[in-house]
Image (cartoon, rainbow, N blue to C red):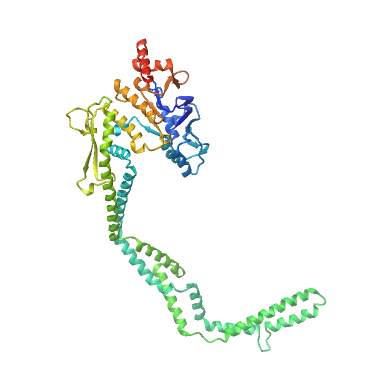
Amino acid sequence: MLLYLTLHQFALIAEHELRFVDGFNVITGETGAGKSLLLDALSLCIGERADTSMVRHGAESADIYAEFDVAENEVVKHWFDEHERSFEAELLIRRQLSSNGRSKAWLNGLPVSLAELKSLGRLLVNIHSQHAQQALLKPQFVVDWLDNMAGLTNLADQTRAAYLTHQRLQRKAEEIASADANRLDKIALLESQLADVEPLLSIDYASVEAEHEELSNIEALMQEAGMALQLLDNDTDEPDANSLVGRAIKLCDNQSAVSSTFGQVAEQLYLAQQQISEATGLLADYAEQQLPDPQRLQELDTLMTLAHRLSRKHNLPASDLVTTAREWQIKLDELNAQPSSADMQQQIETAWQGYLALAEQLSQSRKAEAPAIIQQLIAQLQPLALPNACCEFSFVRHADNDDFNAVGLDDIDLLFSANVGMPMQPLYKIASGGELSRMALVMQVLQATSAKGSDKDQDARPMLVFDEVDVGISGGTAQVVGELLRQLGKRQQLLAITHQAQVASQAHQHILVQKHHEKQSESILQVLSDDAQVDELARMSGGVHITDITREHARSLLNEVNR
């Protein structure tokens, strides 16, 4: 339930806090006074987009606050749980619009995204626009209304999703079919490239390259090892490193008692002598080894020749061939994993059968629920100066499977006749403007109070908002509409804009919007009662010049309600 709507520097409204009652709230006022501003402000608080024109001229920003009582609303509590937000019995939404075009929103003092606000807003407020009667002319509106009334929205959504899945698979199959030849060419090329480099995949190229380089020069390397060995340790009269280091150690040892430096040097030379000895052993082994097996060198020659050939062929460094081959293998696996046209046809057929099953179930459910819904529609229409109204849903199965669509298997029309003995025809062909407006109102009321939703707790129902609820009606029909809305207001909170005194007189709270022109135009809001309400109803009934007769008529309307 909406408790308060507070506006600050919003369009023509400078500052106002408006309290709403639990029941039928009505808004009246001259054309252009700013009645729709309240609906605009409420729309912003439930996540609708804004523009800079909503900021009052001369102000830097506009603020709108909407306070709701949701203490017993289990649906809203569940929303707070799902979004991991702390639930409070009184819910406060703040929306701020800046003159630079920026917009911010807060929920109970914490920032909230417009997407979150919109999903929460659907649970709090249900706005029916003044263009509903134009929507009646669109076949999809009738289908959606039938599904909503019959409680088939989920099944309709599943059917639509199944159809779209089938369409997506068909498009994918077409893409695969057109790309199949190119795909097979790519597979053949990758397989050929991988076969080329397959002998290199099991080796460490860097190690093979190093081994090949060494074995190709082994005799020269052995000679160099022998020469190095002679320099380190030999049996000739030529001085070698080992004997020279030994002599240096002896000299340093002799002087170590005189200077500690000699002692430190001697220790370092002992280590050097050990390292020379180890190096000598390694060089001796290398210089005296047997020549390697010629077959091993031939194997290495073959691998290196292949690596260099493939390097030139694929324009890659030989050292990168193995890494690149792994990338080729990944691409090949991806191409092989793609479904073929034959695989796709099986998926498409399975998806189509799934869609048909859901669509057939939806079609039968719609036909089963339609008669009861039509009875409700006629029962509400007849008191609105349509005593002979007849309605019927028409279901025409598409002749060709290719004509089946996301909506289902049938073309669905709402047939209507307002006159005795006249055949029913699609509503959009024969209904007058007044008939369309009454039909739109009744359909919106029925949707808001449908039997399929009657098991919901009253506190969980969103506030209903009707914009220009009385378009195309007057007189006694307006009286019936007002009574209908008052009865609806006893079940859930309701807000409506009206130009009919008969409708406004039925409200539990009457809000007047007037435009004042002083230094800057401003819309003023006022909750009416007693004589002020009588004067407004008299204005609505009699025009600019209010007389005792129009006042008396206004009082009679209020007295009729209060009986």
> Picture quarter containing residue 443?
top left
204 lies left or right of 251: left
Percent coordinates x, y for residue 98 in the rendering: 49, 33
Q: Is residue 305 above or below residue 39?
A: below
Q: Residue furthest left?
A: 421
Percent x, y for residue 239?
Answer: 69, 85
User: As displayed, is residue 412 above or below residue 235?
Assistant: above
Q: Residue 30, can we see it?
A: no
Q: Which residue lies most toward the front here?
A: 563
Given the current orientation, which residue lies at the most extreme bottom position? Answer: 236
Q: Residue 61: image x %, image y %? A: 50, 30
Q: Is residue 365 visible?
A: yes
Most extreme residue toward the top, as rendered?
A: 548
How many numbered callouts?
0
Task: Judge by depth and name the residue closer to the eye, 485 or 294.
Answer: 485
Residue at x 45% of width, y 21% of height: 526
Left or right of 546 on screen, residue 106: right
The relative height of residue 406 versus residue 197 in the rendered view (above or below) is above
Judge by depth and name the residue closer to the eye, 235 or 59: 59
